[in-house]
Image: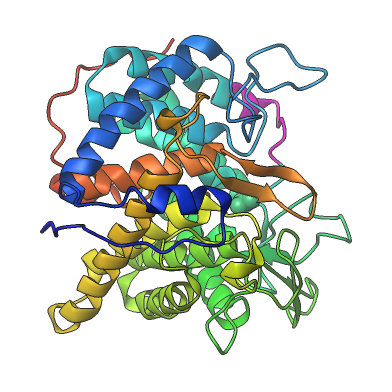
Amino acid sequence: MPDRDMTTTVSLVEHPEAGAASAACTAQPSMVVRAEQAIAAACAQLGRCLQQLGPHFPGDTSRGNYFAPAVWPEEPDGVNSSWTAGFWTGLLWMAHELSGEARFGTAAAAQLDGYSRRLERRFVVDHHDLGFLFMPSCVAALRQGPQPLAHATALQAAALLMTRYLPRAGVVQAWGRLEDPAQRGRIIIDCLLNLPLLHWAAGQGGAAEMREAAISHAQRSREHLVRPDHSSFHTFHFDPETGAPLHGTTAQGASDQSCWARGQAWGLYGFSLNHRWVPEQGFLQTACQLADHFLALLPEHGIACWDMSFPPEAGEPWDSSASAIAACGLMDIAEQLPAAEAERAQRYRAAADRILDGLLRHCAGWDAPGNALLRHGVYSKPDGLGVDEASLWGDFFFLEALARRARGWTPFWHPPAALSSSPISTLTPTPTPV
Ligand code: GLY
């Protein structure tokens, strides 16, 4: 991927940290060099975090920028219980691939057994986030070589995800038990990143219907989660009996009609990823529409406000994780655009660099106290959860964006064939988990 010189001038008035930091804007090394340096710093930070946590999973978000072990009242320590667990295992796999350090691979491999047990016990799996859980953990493990347990576990997870498919509506229900009237027939935009698990499984001997279900869900998402102005609803409700589309709502945004920043980022990256699995469906065009809307609302410094309906001067908290996800998505779209769209591709690459520049300047966790990679995220502002904190997904997509930028690294969400373009070749084989 060609590099470009980054000497961005930022003007940041709406965030307390931004003013001080902007004074330090001077000529910088190229973004490839900066991303490579950041990967080294991130892996060192992850090593410290791993040492502090040992076998325990971190919580969804940090407290004061420190990840502490997740606590689940009736479960033993170290339990794999949240929808975010896969990001922790995935961070360890990523660090293993990027640094070649065996300690990361050993720690990730040791967690695989817990994914299998979690499925067997049906422990907190009444939701659609099985792609987030099982792609960066069990499917990612297969990049190290054949691993029967991880392979079988990921296939079982996909089969469980399929049980959430509502054929009349043609969608995968997001949250809760299928008979729960409050949740029945509801989808959320994040699910676009869970669909690769269905595509992967269909290609690995799973039921062919998985692929059809994934396509149908992405089509319904395009029709109903994306608004005419190319902003997005966080969630949308269907009548599960008739399949009729009902209305859009939010759970984590400012209002039903607002543009929740992380949702818009999930959407632009999610449609791009779905295009990789089924290029004939035109999902790349939708990804571009969502990307253009995201960029139109993004402040110059590249860090999104948690809900994009607020003007930057409103002083609302940033959600750095939305920007990290968007940077991955913009690079993903740019890679797939045809030659005739070279100018658009270059615009998206430049925007991804602008975002990375902002994240490195203002949010890098290794520049401040704490054990996280990416500060200044928001989990759910309406619920007062993880506001101005790091999150596991923020850390994950920040490292993914850096790896893609510096090394053209192939993410875990891509079809396995894409691995042929991955430059990683210096890995120490990790032991198969027992
Ligand atoms: N997928 C849940 C979230 O983005 O908060």
Residue furthest right as drawn: 181
As displayed, is residue 208 above or below residue 41?
Answer: below
Q: Residue at x 36, y 40 (%)?
A: 399
Q: From the image, which quarter does the N terminus lie in?
A: bottom left
Image location (x, y in percent) of residue 72: 76, 22
* Residue at (49, 55) in percent of width and height: 193
Residue under the image location 42 percent in, 38 percent down: 364
**Picture coordinates of residue 391, whole percent (x, y):** 57, 39
Q: Is residue 144 visible?
A: no
Q: Where, quadrant-wise, is the C terminus in this rendering?
A: top left
Does 221 sit left or right of 34 as displayed? Answer: right
Colour option used? rainbow
Residue 208 rendering spot, x and y as whole percentages = 45, 58
Q: Is residue 125 visible?
A: yes
Q: Which residues are magenta?
A: 116-125
x then y, percent, for residue 119: 62, 30
Could you tell me which residue is drawn at 76 percent across and 66 percent down?
185
